[in-house]
């Protein structure tokens, strides 16, 4: 099928318009963009405050079954490794549940629930859960959709915690 010049031009403009969105996505090996997290308790935490620590940004939703299974695994891993410089943040990705309904969960977890993140390219990568792992030097080391399990946490985060 041969496209008219006008149709081809419209298609090219569409591709060019979409390119910055794709380019804005974070990828392993690149420096993490500056970001600010706003926790449910209204505390703001900037990326500059987290330098020197291994950071996990976990994007989740209350309706997501794998997310609900992953949160206890993240909590247990955090309780075991927080003293080694691990910081986990669970970023709620939908507004269907009032923050007040999540207060019991926020109180039970050993890491903060976040209701907003500001930072270019940071968010779910094709679905939830999505995990983005940033090393002590501010470099993205993992950025993939899918739930962490204990073995993957050890494989991905364990070596980063061992780095100086």
Image: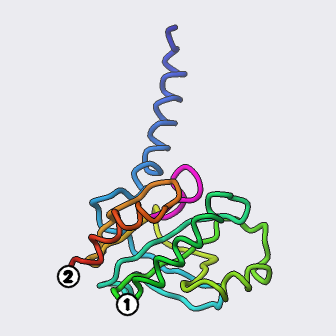
Q: Residue 68: where, in percent of width, then height?
A: 65, 65
Name the residue tied to disc 1.
83
Q: How far is disc 1 from disc 2 in space, using C-alphas?
A: 14 Å
Task: Say whether marks 1 and 2 touch (CB < 8 Å).
Answer: no
Q: For this rendering, which residue is in front, 1 or 53?
A: 53
- Dominant secondary structure (helix, strand or loop) of the stretch shown in magenta: loop
Check disc 2 and report its element: helix, strand or loop.
loop
Name the residue tied to disc 2.
164
Q: Residue 138: where, in percent of width, then height?
A: 30, 74
Q: For this rendering, which residue is in front, 146 or 47?
A: 146
Give the residue furthest to the left.
164
Q: Quadrant of residue 95?
A: bottom right
Q: Residue 139: where, in percent of width, then height?
A: 29, 69
Please state the total of marks drawn on the protein image.
Answer: 2
The residue that appears at 60% across and 79% down in the rendered structure is: 114
4, above or below 54, in the image: above
Q: Residues within 10 Å of mark 1 (few under 14, many from 20)?
A: few
Q: Quadrant of the C terminus?
A: bottom left
Q: Earlier in the sequence, mark 1 or mark 2?
A: 1
124, above or below 76, in the image: above
The residue that appears at 37% across and 90% down in the rendered structure is: 83
Q: Residues within 10 Å of mark 2 (few under 14, many from 20)?
A: few
Q: Residue 122: where, in percent of width, then height?
A: 48, 64
Check disc 1 and report its element: helix, strand or loop.
helix
The residue that appears at 29% across and 85% down in the rendered structure is: 52
The residue that appears at 73% across and 85% down in the rendered structure is: 103
Q: Quadrant of residue 90?
A: bottom right
Disc 1 versus disc 2: nearer the observer: 1
Q: For this rendering, which residue is in front, 4 or 131?
A: 131
Span of residues in magenta:
122-131
Residue 137 is one of the magenta-drawn residues: no
């Amino acid at each position: 099928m041969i496209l008219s010049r006008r149709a081809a031009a419209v298609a090219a403009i569409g591709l060019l318009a979409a390119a910055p969105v794709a380019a804005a996505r974070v990828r392993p090996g690149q420096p993490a963009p500056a970001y600010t997290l706003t926790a449910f308790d209204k505390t703001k935490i900037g990326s500059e405050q987290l330098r020197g620590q291994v950071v996990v940004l976990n994007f989740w939703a209350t309706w997501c079954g794998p997310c609900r299974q992953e949160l206890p695994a993240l909590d247990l891993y955090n309780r075991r490794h927080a003293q080694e410089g691990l910081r986990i943040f669970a970023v709620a990705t939908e507004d269907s549940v009032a923050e007040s309904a999540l207060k019991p969960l926020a109180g039970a977890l050993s890491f903060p629930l976040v209701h907003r993140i500001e930072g270019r390219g940071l968010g779910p990568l094709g679905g939830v859960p999505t995990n983005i792992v940033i090393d002590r030097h501010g470099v993205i080391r993992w950025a993939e959709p899918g739930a962490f399990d204990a073995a993957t946490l050890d494989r991905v985060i364990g070596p980063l915690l061992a780095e100086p």
